[in-house]
Image (cartoon, grey):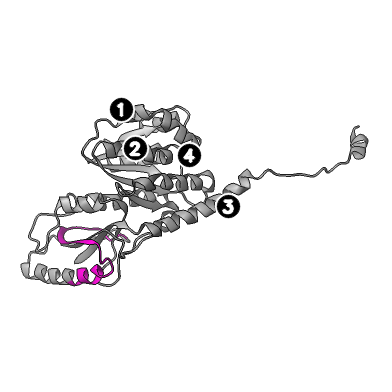
Amino acid sequence: MRTIGSGNCGMKLAVLFDEESVLLSTADQDAANFRGQRVHKFNNDGCGKKFGTGLKLWNTRSSQLEYALEDITNDQVIVFSSLGGGSGSSSLQFISKILIEQGNDVLIVGILPYKKEVVPPLANAVQSLNSLLPFINDVSIMLFDNQILLKEYDYNWQKVNDSIIQKINYTVNLISKHSSDGYSPATIDQSELESVIFGGGFIDLSDNFLEEKPPKFAYGRLDKETKNVLIAMFVDEEIKSKELLEEYHNILTTVQSKYAGRARNARIVPGIIRGRIKDSNSERDIEDRAYITIASGLNVDKYSTKIEKLRDEAVEKATIFSTRQKGRNIVSSKETKVLDI
């Protein structure tokens, strides 16, 4: 698996996830934050947080971008980027096209701007998401909303970034890093996990306890449009009793049946994983069992509604900046002569 970070925010998150990430920058001051790591620079002065400026830059640097990504072939690739900046937001359509043509499976992790970043970041996010919709069947897109995360983590950026990385970690490393060897009556293998993650469309993860309430996703929900649903029940690695695991298997079957009706056209991938998993609301380990639900191919219309709302907000804010201000004369020509002392 390979990782790419585009733009300042994207590079920061990519390095937090994988120190060997491929980093793409258009500004000297951003690249300077990553000394000791190889950064591909495409410009010196950045894009001024303007999507249009970035679009022109990537159009003229396409061959350089192809060179930077030429050794990433036939692999799974995670691309981190802010959707509010100029460089990263405008690069995603170009990166996606190159990676797809080189036989890669692609997961884009896009970070939506918070409310104080209204102009131009809000407009950039709308244009960036719009540019990705032609690729929606060939790339998976996972969105994080900084407005929601900042409130949840008391405006602490470090905690926000850590929460994003933790969620991506559980998504792509569910088996390799969060399970332990041992008996399970219903296993999930790595290829099944990857087929859900890289199945195309919008993807999200929920850690709701499914025996009590349905999975909670940022904008979508399980419905007839959902393509893939992976339901992983985590049980404590210390549990040795096969009888107890068989009991959990029966519970999982009931849960699967309950939610399969909501996503009646989806491929359901259920399984029991032995390991340790953190409660998302605290640092304690879950002692008995917990659930991770990953859904891909979530209803695009739900996300389109979110994008359209962002568009309307962006247009409203941008109108203020595009309107020429008018003033009236405070002093008449006669008064001007009097005041000319």
Residue 29, position as x, y percentages in the image = 44, 31
Identify the element where label 1 is drawn.
helix
Q: Is residue 138 left or right of residue 131?
A: left
Residue at image coords 41%, 39%: 88
Disc 2 packing (10 Å; few <14; some 14–19; many ≥20): many
Q: Earlier in the sequence, mark 4 or mark 3?
A: 4
Q: CA distance from mark 2 to mark 4?
A: 15 Å
In the rendered structure, which amino acid carries the disc numbered 3?
A: Glu
Q: CA distance from mark 1 to mark 4?
A: 23 Å
Identify the element where label 2 is drawn.
helix
Q: Which dot marks residue 316?
A: 3
Q: CA distance from mark 4 to mark 3?
A: 18 Å
Q: Earlier in the sequence, mark 2 or mark 4?
A: 4
Q: Which residue is mark 4?
A: 51
Q: Which dot marks residue 67?
A: 1
Residue 262, position as x, y percentages in the image = 28, 69
Q: Is residue 181 left or right of residue 287?
A: left
Q: Which residue is mark 2?
A: 95
Residue 139, position as x, y percentages in the image = 30, 46
Compare residues 285 and 228 and report the one nearer the observer.
Answer: 228
In the rendered structure, which amino acid carries the disc numbered 2?
A: Ile
Q: State which region is magenta.
A: 254-280
Q: Is residue 204 above or below residue 214?
A: above
